[in-house]
Amino acid sequence: MELVLIITFSGLIGALVRYLVPGRDRHGLFVLPGLHIAAASLLWTASVWAGLSPYSVWPWLVSLVLSTAGGVWLALWLPRRRDAEDQELLESLSR
């Protein structure tokens, strides 16, 4: 049951990050929520396998905070990377 809640909350946080961080026009609609869901699910599972109680706050904090940090980093990195690659392609096609 807790894993279903992690999936739901991480998807909502991913959607929120998508609309709060600038540059959302340069990546897909489901990139950030999908990343949040995958990362939070893996982190939740790893923290429970590591011995943390699924009823304590620590697996929640580990999974939601780290997946949010990764999602914000990706939301900031993807537009810059795409702009750089688009500029490089434009220069190579202009020669």
Image (tube, helix red, strand yellow):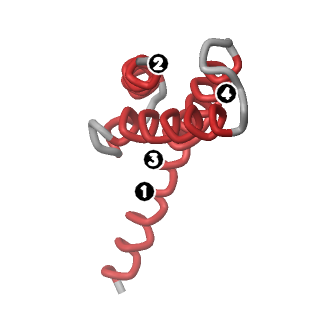
Q: Secondary structure at mark 4?
A: helix
Q: Which residue is label 3 attached to?
A: 79
Q: Secondary structure at mark 3?
A: helix
Q: Which residue is label 1 attached to?
A: 82
Please name the residue shown 42% across and 34% down the image: 37
Are circles 1 and 3 on residues that touch, CB within 8 Å?
A: yes
Q: Where's the N terminus, which quadrant?
A: top left
Callout 3, which amino acid? Pro
Mark 1 or mark 4: name the one nearer the start of the chain: 4
User: Residue 69 is drawn in which quadrant?
Assistant: top right
Are circles 1 and 4 on residues that touch, CB within 8 Å?
A: no
Q: Where's the C terminus, which quadrant?
A: bottom left
x and y percent of residue 4 in the render? 38, 22
Q: Which residue is label 2 attached to?
A: 2
Callout 2, which amino acid? Glu
| Image position of 93 with respect to 52: above or below | below
Are circles 1 and 2 on residues that touch, CB within 8 Å?
A: no
Please name the residue shown 67% across and 27% down the image: 62
| Image position of 39 with respect to 64: above or below | below
